[in-house]
Image (cartoon, rainbow, N blue to C red):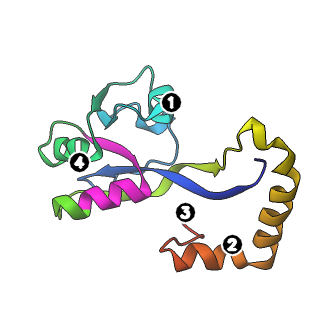
Amino acid sequence: MPVSHISTQQMAFARDRSIKIESWRELSPYKIVFRQDDEIAERKTRDMRRYLASSEEAALKMIENYKMDIAIADRFDGLAALEKLNFDDVHMLKPEIQIVPLYHYINRKHRKLLSRITFVMRSLQSSGRMAEILREHGFDPTTE
């Protein structure tokens, strides 16, 4: 579907709040860790010192225990893991490293519906209703 309804933000998490990371290239001096099935992070950090963890929680524990410098996770999962672990000394760094728009998948057998669904999605966006729906479900469209 050609209309993105929400996006995810790839964020860096570290103990040291003074670290400034605004792009993937700026991660190269650090030891980084991220969840093993994070395809974007795997692709963008191919030649860097990195470790693949089994989960966001495992990655953040490595930061907490000084084994790695920076963990990479999307904003939602990273903040949820921080809250679950109750770490006060691991912080999400701003700004985001990358914003990735997300799209709905339409099965080929429903291809005939694509133009109508696209029209409705664009209408929802232009009217502001899409943002309202996202807010009703706990998402801030300005940061998602």
- Which residue range is magenta in the image? 69-82
Measure how far apart labels 4 and 1 are at the Cα level: 21 Å
- Mark 4 secondary-structure assignment: helix
* Amino acid identity at mark 3: Glu
Disc 2 element? helix
Which mark, by number, is residue 44? 1
Marks 2/1: CA distance?
31 Å
The amino acid marked with disc number 4 is Glu
Q: Which residue carries the number 3 mark?
A: 144
Q: Earlier in the sequence, mark 4 or mark 3?
A: 4
In-front residue for pair 124/143: 124
Q: Can residue 17 be seen in this view?
A: no
Q: Which amino acid does label 2 sit on?
A: Met
Magenta span has 68? no
Three-letter code, disc 1: Lys
Q: State which quadrant residue 72 falls in.
A: top left
Horizontal side of 142 relative to 112 (left or right) equals: left
Q: Which mark is residue 8?
A: none
What residue did someone put label 4 on?
Answer: 57
Q: In this view, does 104 lie above or below 67?
A: below
Which residue lies at the image location 86% right of the left edge and 46% below the top edge?
112
Foreground: 127 or 144? 127
Q: Nearest to the eye among marks 3 and 1: give it.
A: 3
- Quarter residue 68 falls in: top left
CA distance separating discs 3 and 1: 21 Å
**Is 78 within the magenta?**
yes
Tell how many labels.
Answer: 4
Residue designated by label 2: 130
Mark 2 vs mark 3, foreground winner is 2
**Percent coordinates x, y for residue 129 in the rendering:** 71, 78
Is there a contact, CB below 8 Å, between mark 4 and mark 2?
no
The span from disc 4 to disc 2 (Cα, nearest Å) is: 31 Å
